[in-house]
Image: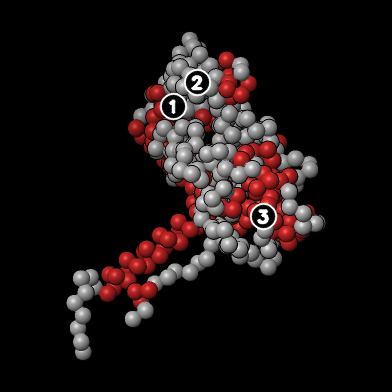
Amino acid sequence: MKKHNYPLSYPLVLALVLAAGVALWTTQANAQTNATAEPDLPAVPYEYANISLPQHYLRPPVVNQDNTPANNPITNEGATLGRVLFYDTRLSANNTISCASCHQQSHSFSDPDALSTGFAGGLTARNAMSLADARYFQPGTFFWDERAATLEDQVLQPIQNSVEMGLTLDEMVAKLQATSFYPPLFEQAFGTPEINSERVSLALSQFVRAMVSYEAKYDVGVASNFSNFTPQENLGRQLFNGRGNCNACHRTDAFVAEESTNNGLDAVTTDAGLGGITGNPADNGKFKVPSLRNIEVTGPYMHDGRFSTLAEVVEFYNSGVQSHPNLDPRLRTPNSQPRRLNLTNTEKAALVAFLQTLTDDSFIHDPKFSNPFLTHTLYLPLLQR
């Protein structure tokens, strides 16, 4: 038998190629389609409208935080259309960026980069906030500075942004009309095949509001008095709800704050946040507070992505809160100084452990939220011998 002098053993080559294929699949899953791609959708739509939420999502205060408007309830067909739009790079000027490029499912629909890269290579001004449980911010406003009055308003703004996706709404509609599959999807969702920006807004909003995360270790614990928690996780839970006072802002089981706040990131204003929208100096440095759901996978943290790890976030609240004039009173001591928790290393580690119980693996791997343009084929030319 003829021998071949390969620099690497064949099993090692096989392993490397398989790894490369998996890496390629993962990259594709997070964002990219192309201008001729068509979605692969199930014959029967996934269930988005009537999901089996646990009881702590169906009673106050969580249920009262739902910002779903009466004129845009979630439907299976509407959210299916929204899913296709969310992952379609046709919504950018050069067919390179989709909503999912900056809101990646594996990161609870946030961006692992501090700032997101737009269609022409430019960077966004702020970090891409996680979309998990976005429907449970009762005021219904969106973006870090709350400049969008509703989710229906918010979903169209990145498409038109000159850095992010770079399309006009008329250009977007024309590109969607040029496909064979969008008219039937619009008809299934809205009764007629007409494509317009209002319907795009409604469908994208339905898909985002369907992104409810409710199957974490924490949710199992709610029903069992947290008997499933380790001692470290229960210590973290007690600190979160007690001396740490974290639940003063993240008040409900959706872990979403009810208003924007200045959390003392800086002693002076470096980004006006809400104040830049309202023009009120008392709002300077205030930002919307996202849900802590899946916080373990949504780093880097804060509106500018300044913290890389949860340990850094906990240390900031432990010892680093700055005395900005608009600092939230909940982060001040009775003598108006920034609060210091003076946690031990054991306690800080316990807080991190508790926050990790909010990770919902089923949510970040659920196929109904995945890329419908993805082809799951791995090309392995080295195996064709």
Which residue lies at the image location 41% right of the left edge and 34% below the top edge? Answer: 307
Per the image, label 2 sits on a secondary structure element best described as helix
Q: According to the image, label 3 marks what residue? A: 176
Check disc 1 and report the residue beneath it: 317
In the foreground, 371 or 193 = 193
Looking at the rendering, in which quadrant would you find the C terminus? Answer: bottom left
Answer yes or no: do the residues labelled 1 and 2 have beta carbons within 8 Å?
Answer: yes
Q: Nearer the viewer, residue 7 or 305?
A: 7
Q: Amino acid at mark 3?
A: Leu
Residue lying at the far right of the rendered structure: 191
**In the image, what residue occupies the spot 50% across and 24% down?**
271
> How crowded is the residue under tag 3: few (<14 C-alpha within 10 Å), some, or many (20+)?
some
Amino acid residing under circle 2: Leu
Q: Is residue 377 left or right of residue 46?
A: left
Give above or below for 192 relative to 61: below
**Residue of label 2:** 331
Residue 34 drawn at (x, y percent):
54, 58
Q: Position of residue 68 (x, y in %)?
A: 72, 41
Say which residue appears at 63% left-offset and 30% top-offset: 147
Q: CA distance from mark 3 to mark 2?
A: 48 Å
Question: Is residue 16 shown left or right of residue 335?
Answer: left
Give the distance between the C-alpha atoms of the residues marked 3 and 1, in whole angstroms. 46 Å
> Marks 1/2: CA distance?
9 Å
Q: Nearer the viewer, mark 3 or mark 1?
A: 3
Figure quadrant of residue 329: top right
* Helix, strand or loop status at disc 3: helix
